[in-house]
Amino acid sequence: MTRLFIAICVVMGMVLPAAAQDENVLRWASRGDALTFDPHGQNETPTITALTQVYETLVSRDAALTLMPRLATSWEITEPTVWEFQLREGVTFHDGTPFTAEDVAFSLTRAQGDSSDFRSLINTIESVEVVSDHVVRVHTSVPTPLLVANLTDVFIMSAAWSSTHNVEEAQDFAAGEENYAVRHANGTGPFTLELREPDIRSVFTRFDGWWGLEVFEPHNVDRIIYTPITNDATRVAAILSGEVDFVLDPPLQDLRRLESAPGLQVQQTAQVRTIFFGLDQASDELRSSNIRGANPFADRRVRLAMYQAIDIDAIQSRIMRGLSQPAGVIISPPINGHTAALDTRPGFDPDAARQLMADAGYADGFSVTLDCPNNRYVNDEAICQATVAMLARIGIEVTLDAQPKSLHFPKIDNRETDFYMQGWGVPTLDSEYVFQFLYYTGRRNNGTGYSNARLDELTDLMAQELDEARRNEMIAEAWAIATEDIVFLPLHHQVIVWAVSDEFDQPIVANNTPQFYMGRFTD
Amino acid sequence: MGFLILNRVFQAALVMIVVAMAAFVLSNYVGDPISNMVGQEATQEDRDQLREDLGLNDPAPVQFVRFIGNALQGDFGISYRLQRPVSDLVAERLPATLELVMVSAIFALVVGIPLGIFTALYRTFWGSRLILTVSLAGVSLPTFVVGILLIYVFSVTLQWLPSFGRGETTALGGWTTGLLTVDGWRAIIMPAITLGLYQLTLILRLVRAEMLEVLRTDYIKFARARGLTNRAINFGHALKNTMIPVITIVGLNIGGLIAFSIVTETVFQWPGMGLLFVQAVQFADVPVMSAYLVLASLIFVLTNLVVDILYVVIDPRLRTERRVKAGV
Amino acid sequence: MTDQQAHIPHQSLGSRMVDGIRRFAGSDLLYSFVRQPVVVVAFLITVIFILAAIFAPLVAPHDPFNPASLSLMDSFFPPSWVEGGDARFLLGTDNQGRDIFSTIIYGARISLMVGFAAVVFSIALGVLVGLISGFVGGWFDALLMRFADIQLTIPGLLIALLVDGIARTALPSDMREEIAIYVVIFAIGISNWPQYARVARSGAMSEKVKDYVASARIIGTPSWVILLRHVLPNILGPVLVLGTIGLALAITSEATLSFLGVGVPPTTPSLGTLIRIGNDFLFSGEWWITLFPSGALVVLVLAVNLLGDWLRDALNPKLR
């Protein structure tokens, strides 16, 4: 038996491929896998993070989140409804095809298709005109001052490759469609997709023909192996034992241990994402409440009472371990329209809250169900549990229903929840994005049923306003209305934390999307 | 004997039909398959059209026959969660689970049988009592606690073994194996121990009980009276007679191993069917759940069938009551 | 006539029990019990757990299931004897400020309740099916036993997970939390009934051919009376053994389901839920959240297993 075992070991030793020892392999782990590799299939941060290693956009953001040229070298508004982009020359796709204006026209059209998840970002585009091999003009139906900011997540594919592999339309993710682009990729980016096993691992290899090697300081990452590890404890164990080099979402409670572990560093920065609760304030009565014939949330006093009953400092110090910034508005500081005055909460005051409840006629409280995701935001379920306890003290008996994100979010979209947790990041770094998606009457992501004619009007106006000062006035007025009405109960702005091996140097970015060409192995 | 084997095959087929019916009911009547497939903006006409296209308006027996037909070709539809054909997902993950189960079973046998024999032969020795008590503690430790403790000790504290995944795998045609690389073997040690521990305890206790019972029988007493050596009696006669039920139990427990691989795979992030299944349960991913049910049942039924047939071949006399006693 | 009646014991159930206890007191069972200190300890531990669970509101210093009594500022206190601990919380607190000691007691209450209810459910269903099956025989028996065979083929954990998964999809979401615990009981209970059915069936089959049953039938005693009076007492022993081991199994199953995140809701944690929560804090130094509940679970299951083990050996005449 033993002899057999030794024999096996010897054979295995010979079979083992001689691993190149001097290869720099970045082993990267996070909680959830990318949902697809179709560049226009899903607008979701973990998916975009994986895509951004392989595909590029016309415009992107640097580590400080300022816009920077990528496949476009410059852009300008030539007429109110026309944007002109100069494209980079000498760029090739991974399969060797040169990158031209045709690819841009094709990709923007594809991203606007019915099955694309990015179409609402660029729905004002009417046509893309190919002026020459390296110049395009984008015509919009109305003036669209934020078009460039909206293009930072729209990836460019090869028209020829898409036609060869019959993927001219984006994967219809919701309909369960699978196409060639879901597991294969051909971008212009710094890495090629070598292997894709969904939920198991993805392997990326350095693309030696990448144009950026000559433009930026060249990176030294030869290969990236990405492994999704759902279990928090396992993910921590993996980086502690040196099996991975980079964890995108280390659990907050383990940071102290990670910090003190030799060979590891923990980086942090404020994220452009705010977490808040939504309340259905429009329905005649709540679905899950014992109060019939009336909707307690329709009463501003009740909403204010709940706001004041939440001890955000306790949540910050105990659940978030200090790694959050209590919020008074659902946009974070880097976003245009944010002010310190907006971002202040009414003080935590259970007595005042109880008084407000009594004034509103709910001295005996009421019951309601809180819907909460359990795998989307940092410590989402724990925050919801703590909220249950805090609201119990002002008489609101909350039943908690914590579920995976794929079951939670449809409830908001389908108006099947009275009281829910939500988080919102703003890729455009402008308030308009938030008004469009969360406050506008009847929008899918507006689960509160909130409707305010003036706010809708302001939102429409600010989308087309080219004068910056006038536009900012509109934004300020809109926020005054939204804050006064207490449409949402803000909780906090998230803080991003990355755990990285000392041997790898990667600048942290506030959109939580690391681009590994910016990383360096230090010997 | 031919009749008995035929009977067993017939029973196995019956089981699979019942399981297929359960899977059919699960995938067609639990939740609304349509609303899981179309986007929120789909119109009522789109939904009706899709319903007609998918044949959901046909009579139930027609749908069932179609379901069986598809299942026989390995088609279980598309996962709601991962948006990929379930058959592809299963094909990717089956090797990981089967390798884990095999290695665990071998571990449980190789350690369990000798310990069982030892504790039976030296019943009163303190070491035997210790082994028995510890083994009971082994049964009482939930699988996930064992896994977590192993990770804590061997991955985090000592940093000897990897805490997750299969390590480096080699593709052999459609099968990926982790058993051809040192890395793969290192990765399988802790999951296999975690999964096999419970089976080890069962085997140990079963071997002990069977051995004790056999040692009591008249023919062993007679053998002693004839003056045979202890060694000849213990290993020549007693052990041989103990092995039949042990082999049965091991065969039957393959099912248990597959079921508990769900827990082990969750703890060690082992990319097998169990992990796929538990995520399917959390996400109410019905096509994956029904496919797993059919596939796992098929494996149980086949192992049962093989064990039963072996049994009939080896020892028809004991056929009926052993399984009752095993209470698996 | 009187001759016949002499064969049929005509005692009330009560007096039969008294008789049983008297027999037990003078039996080998009691002798083997007191002779094994390990078993006595296991028995005591089980009793303590059960009493603590029943009287949880009196025993536990805090009520962790009442959200209004929790304060987040009390979270993550280490055990009281460790530096930084608080005298109010003997074994420390969890991430929501729940007292671990109280939560273990309340959690054990849930675990034991789920365990007992699941076993009772299994026994009731299994014994009923088994008795009827064995007594009626014929195609009815064949059908039921084939069904039991099918179920035995599939491991209990898998069935429990499936039942839970189906309930999750089929039931409206606002009901889910209220009935979660019943779903778990049903899921665990339904996965274990065939064992009891087999024992009951073989008991019924062996009894029904005996003379006194035939006699009882002749004088018109209804079948269910015969089953209840004569068959049931005979299978109590094996059912008790199976039930004890089944209890340990059910508690472990519940913990496993809760660990996988499909068991009882986190606002009313069982031991398994507590371990799952605590597992996230194992590496961060808050070991008490997972270690104490794990210890409690292991001790409880071990004690029950030891009892079951001893019962089986004690009731098996071959091993004496």
Image (cartoon, coloured by chain):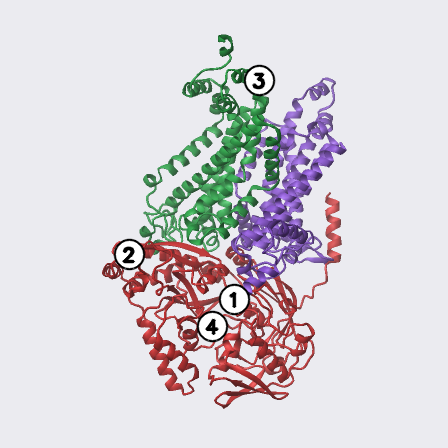
Q: Name the front one of labels 3 and 1.
A: 1
Proximity of marks 2 and 3: CB atoms separated by less than 8 Å: no
For label 1, the crowd category at 10 Å Cα-Cα, with few meaning under 14, some 14 to 19 and many 20 or more, is few
Q: Please give the name of the residue rendered at 41% of the width and 62% of the height, measured from the top-left corner.
A: A421
Residue B251's image quarter?
Answer: top right
Answer yes or no: are tags 2 and 3 on the same subunit. no
Task: From the image, tell me which residue sits under label 3.
Answer: C210
Q: Name the front one of labels 4 and 3.
A: 3
Q: Residue C278 in the image: x percent, y percent?
A: 45, 51
Answer yes or no: are tags 3 and 1 on the same subunit. no
Give the residue type at disc 1: Thr
Q: Name the front one of labels 1 and 4.
A: 1
Q: Residue under mark 3: which chain is it in?
A: C
Task: From the image, tell me which residue sits under label 2.
Answer: A394
- Examine the rendering and report whether any part of residue C290 can be seen: yes
Colour of chain C, in one word, is green
